[in-house]
Image (cartoon, rainbow, N blue to C red):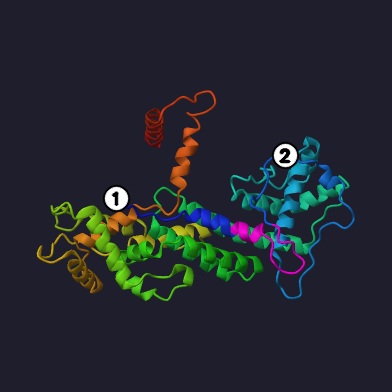
Amino acid sequence: MVPSYHQLCLAHGIQCAVLDVLYKADNTEGNTGITVNRPCDSSDSEDESDIENEDENRFVIEADPSGVIPKLVYKELITKVRKIVKFLKGSPTRMDILNSYLESKSKDTTLILDCKTRWSSLADMIARFLEFKDAIQKTLIDLKEKTTFSDTEILILKDMSSSLNFIKATVEELCERKSNLLTAEIALQFMMEKLAMNPDVISGQLKEALNRRILQRRNATLVSTLQYLHNPTKYYDERNTPHAFSKASHAEIIALIVKINETYFCKDKAATTVFEAEDGLPLREIQRQQRLEDEREQDTAKTFKEQLKTKDNETLHNTAEVSTKHLSENDDLETSVRVEMALLDRSGPKSIHLQRVYDFLLTIPPTSVEAERVFSANRYFYNHLRCSFNDDTLDALSFLRSYFMNTRK
């Protein structure tokens, strides 16, 4: 079998980092070291007596003089918010009382409960809770509930919501169908920069956990080779990067380029043609110039998601030109690659062997989300009512569904 090149799912690595911070206890004194592997239980069948029978020694966070917040605090605080949301959503009467305080504030007065199969719903639940926090407090007072939230707890929830929104936007960028290793690297680095700018404790803890998880999953050789082929000058300027975004050595890049060419392309000796327009310019260059002209707009206040899109576009459109010239056929492949790389380093065009590898690496997805989408789509066809389909039938149905959905767009 032909060996394949792949990147472990970066979205899952981010999820594991979030769980490490929010749901796994510290090994510090006073903590039990209990680990919770699921963020929540989406079932609404939990006994409401958990809230109604709370004693006077309810959970209240006191500020730590050292400024360090144990991770166990986050888990207990999230559990407390989740119980309040379940308690209010579990009764139309309670929701009517809540809505009476929200009539003049917001059109959408529905509380959001997070789901164990979608960790990003935690950010939505906390954001909606903070939006309605005053009305929720008044509702709990009317219902004569003892559960309250201190100012310190609200502050921690705000810091948590801010950090999770950065991470959520980054995950959405990683999971787009057009995402590749290059855009994923830009998104991850931009997320880490934003977390580093936040002075709160949880941002630092999330940054540390994300660094560790990204380092475990990131294929540095594939990413470094793609970055180098995309823009060698910028690649060398950014050599001093954080450890989680380390660069591969020059020898490793050469070895990967040679191996990919030997494995996938050297059997075909025919020259690869780059289509040119009537004026002699490569079609790729004309398209790039057109995109740059179309995207020149005045700078306005942008959200984190818009800033991330802008950074992706700026990087992707700044790439080397393509050359159709071949080196001497008498040169061996490694020698040819070294000469082509030397020309590229001197701002020369991207020759045939380098362009092939560049296009090849752009096809590697940074996540396994596309495969998960296929599984989710197939559940519409393959269920307990129709469970005798074979693989060919499922493939045909999945293809037709994708085709008609794209046509409808």
With respect to residue 119, does 48 lie above or below? Answer: above
**Mark 1 or 2 closer to N-term?**
1
Where's residue 136, x and y in %?
78, 49
Front tag of 1 and 2: 1
Vertical arrangement, residue 65 with respect to residue 155, above or below? below
Left or right: residue 124 versus residue 274 is: right
Is disc 2 surrounded by few (<14), some (14 to 19) or many (20+) residues within 10 Å? few
Residue 221 visible in the shown view: yes
Q: Is residue 183 magenta?
A: no
Q: Is residue 24 magenta?
A: yes
The CA span between labels 1 and 2 is 49 Å
Residue depicted at x 18% and y 62%: 323
The circle drawn on residue 2 is: 1
Q: Main secondary structure of the magenta part?
A: loop
- Say how many tags the image has: 2
Residue 319, visible in the rendered structure? no
Q: Position of residue 368 (x, y in %)?
A: 45, 49
Which label sits on residue 321?
none
Nearer to the camera, 252 or 242: 252
User: Element type at marker 2?
Assistant: loop
- Residue under the point 35% across and 60% down: 316
**Which SS class for mark 1?**
loop
Disc 2: which residue? 44
Image point (22%, 64%), residue name: 350
- Tell me where residue 248 sits by quadrant: bottom left
**Magenta residues (range):** 18-34
